[in-house]
Amino acid sequence: MRDRPLLLLIDDEQSLVENLTVLLKREGFDVISELTGSGGLQRFRDEAPDIVLSDVRMPKVTGIDVLEEIRRSSPETPVVLMTAQASLQSAIQAVNLGATHYVQKPFKNDEMIAVLNRSLDWGRLKTENAGLKRELKKQQTLKAGKPIGVSPTFELSLGLAEDVAESESTILIVGESGTGKEVFARYIHDLSSRSTRRFLSLNCGALPEGLLESELFGHVKGSFTGAVKDKEGLFVAASGGTFFLDEVGEMAPSTQVKLLRVLQQREVIPVGSTEAVNVDVRLIAATNRDLERDIEEGRFRRDLYYRLNVISLELPPLRLRKEDIPLLAEHFLLNQSGEDEPKKLSPKALQVLQEYHWPGNVRELENVIERAVVLTAGNSIKPDAFPTRLREKPAEPLVQDRPAPNPALEIIERAYIEHVLNAEGGNKTKAAEVLGIDPSTLYRKIKRYDLDE
């Protein structure tokens, strides 16, 4: 908490800046100043002042430009504009765009100080109001938007998500397809200080390289065939909020370079442009790939991986948190019920759900529940409402969690496990899935056969 409010003064008239600085310091403000709009915006990002006082008419970046940028990135910061008589219409426009007040030049000193103090009071009230709204939304989120689960592995992931939500650090969520990576990303956003701003998401694997770059960074008119007008990229559109970049491992190398620039410089260059655009966004990335293996094989940049992996959040697959299946099923049944009373799972149906291995994870469970609700006429869901794959007994795994009956089979089993581990690049979770055994079983066999590297 500052003892004196910090004021950013932006005006291209040096003498006015000097005189105002003396006045404002005498009246209890700490003052920083810039002579250009672009310099003022950079100083705003660096210093986060309590209030901004800017001239309207400046070359290149005007006071209106300054106002619009600050409103996007920090809507609670009061902005007061100064204008000459000739630009009075601009001042009225500025108020409509969100300026707290405008002061007409030449002004009286006591008038200026009164306007600034009123604006500071407005800013404090708006900040307090925004804080109350965030807290209310956080409480609502904890009740309604919280990811569902009570298993120890899931609760570890959930606890880490809650611990890092208020930070500005980039997060990499790792997990198999369908484990709920976007649900976690939204939960983190809703608990963060950015929760009142936008949450945008994009799946990198859903678009070809050229279109992906345009969606991420924007483009200028004429930059390629079909670019009939300028387009704002999602990084700019999400400014002030959170951007969720799903399946980041599917991104082409050339796009990876541009994403690295965003993380390093906090700016984007639209396709076909040479002008950088500053962005203020919290990035959450996700992948179902083994990025470390992709790095070794030259498919993913090591420097980008370290930029993304500031905080790593690993989501367990549903087969390793089967105690959560009843809770998730009940939640999906409630969502499907609408105005009607929710249908119930028969004991046998619940048993079938808990015995299935769920390669599609939570997403697959949700789809199975939706299908069962549609196919069940009564109130109780039976196993025959489930797809055949759930009701069939799974094939005997190739590797059992029991001692091999003779030394020859032990040699075969050891060789097979070693082969699968090598094929999966040492990823034990994927190797266990290929082998058809629980990861804990695989770990015991690795120890038994001395397969640790």
Image (cartoon, rainbow, N blue to C red):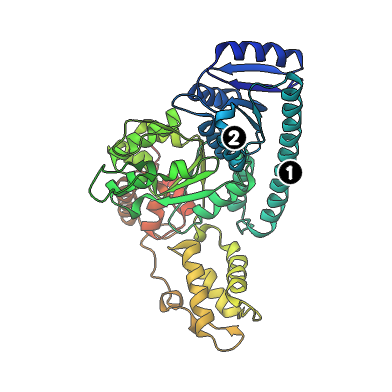
Give the mark nearer the N terminus: 2 vs 1. Answer: 2
Few, some or many C-alpha atoms within 10 Å of disc 1 (few <14, some 14-19, many ≥20)? few
Assign a secondary structure to mark 2.
helix
The reply, left or right, for residue 304 in relation to residue 62 is left
Few, some or many C-alpha atoms within 10 Å of disc 2 (few <14, some 14-19, many ≥20)? many
Can you say whether 313 is above or below 318 in the image? Answer: above
Q: Residue at x 27, y 37 (%)?
A: 298
Can you say whether 101 is above or below 412 in the image? Answer: above
Judge depth for marks 2 and 1 and give the one in front. 2
| Nearer-the-camera pick, 163 or 117 | 117
Q: Which image quadrant: the N terminus?
A: top right
Q: Residue furthest left?
A: 225
Can you say whether 204 is above or below 3 in the image? Answer: below
Assign a secondary structure to mark 1.
helix
Q: Which image quadrant: the C terminus?
A: top left
The reply, left or right, for residue 153 in relation to residue 126 is left
Which amino acid, by three-letter code, is at mark 2? Ala
Q: Return the mark for residue 91.
A: 2
Image spot of residue 144 (x, y percent): 66, 60
Residue on which disc 1 sits: 129
| Nearer-the-camera pick, 21 or 333 | 21
